[in-house]
Amino acid sequence: MSTKRILPPTYLLAALALMVALHLLLPGPRLLSGLFTLLGLVPLLAGVAINLVADGEFKRLGTTVKPGEESTTLVTTGVFRLSRNPMYLGFVLVPVGVALQLGTLTPWIVVLAFVVLMDVLFIRPEEDMLEETFGQAFLDYKRRTRRWL
C-alpha cells in the first residue's frame, strides 16, 4: 500500500487558513493598520513570482519539482544562483505577505512554524538527497549559495 505524502502547497494552504483563523479569533495586538497592510502585497507577489520562475527553471532543465523524487539535474542557474531553495523561500514569502496584510500579531506564530516545518520536513531531507546524488558538485554549490537567501 502506498502512502501519499503531504506536499508543500498543502502545508501552505493550511498555514494560510490557520493564520486567518487566528487573526479572526485571537488577533493579539495590531501591528499594522490601514494602508500599511497593503505592504503585504510585496512579499506575497514576490513569493508567487519566485515560485513561478523556479518552477520554470526545473521544467526547462527537465528535472522533477516534486519533493522526495530523485533529481536528474542539479539546478544552480536562475534564481537558484541566489538561493538553494527559492521555491521554499517563495512559499514563506506568501504567508509573510498575508501576515502583513492581516496586521495582527498571532498570524506570525504560524509563519515561524511554517518556516521550521519546511526546513525540517523538506529542505534538509532534499539537501541530503542532493548531496547523495550529486556529491561534490552539490557540496560546492552548497558552499557558495545560501540556503534561503
Image: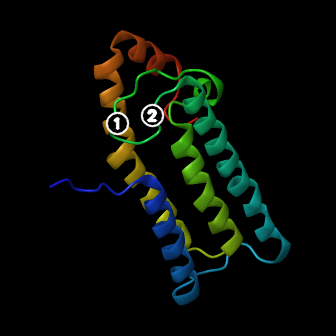
Rendered residue at 55%/52% (across/down): 92
Q: Examine the rendered structure and indicate whether residue 56 appears above or below residue 89.
A: above
Give above or below for 2 relative to 131.
Answer: below
- Label 1: state its secondary structure: loop
Q: Is residue 135 left or right of residue 35?
A: left
**N-terminal-most mark, 1 or 2:** 2
Q: Residues within 10 Å of mark 1 (few under 14, many from 20)?
A: few
For the residue pair 72 and 12, the one nearer the viewer reads as 72
The residue sitting at the front extreme is 1
Question: How many numbered markers are drawn?
Answer: 2
Q: Position of residue 126 (x, y in %)?
A: 35, 35
Q: Residue at x 68, y 74 (%)?
A: 103
In the image, residue 45 above or below residue 79: below
Residue at 82%, 77% in the rendered image = 34
Q: Name the amino acid, label 1.
A: Glu
Disc 1 marks which residue?
69
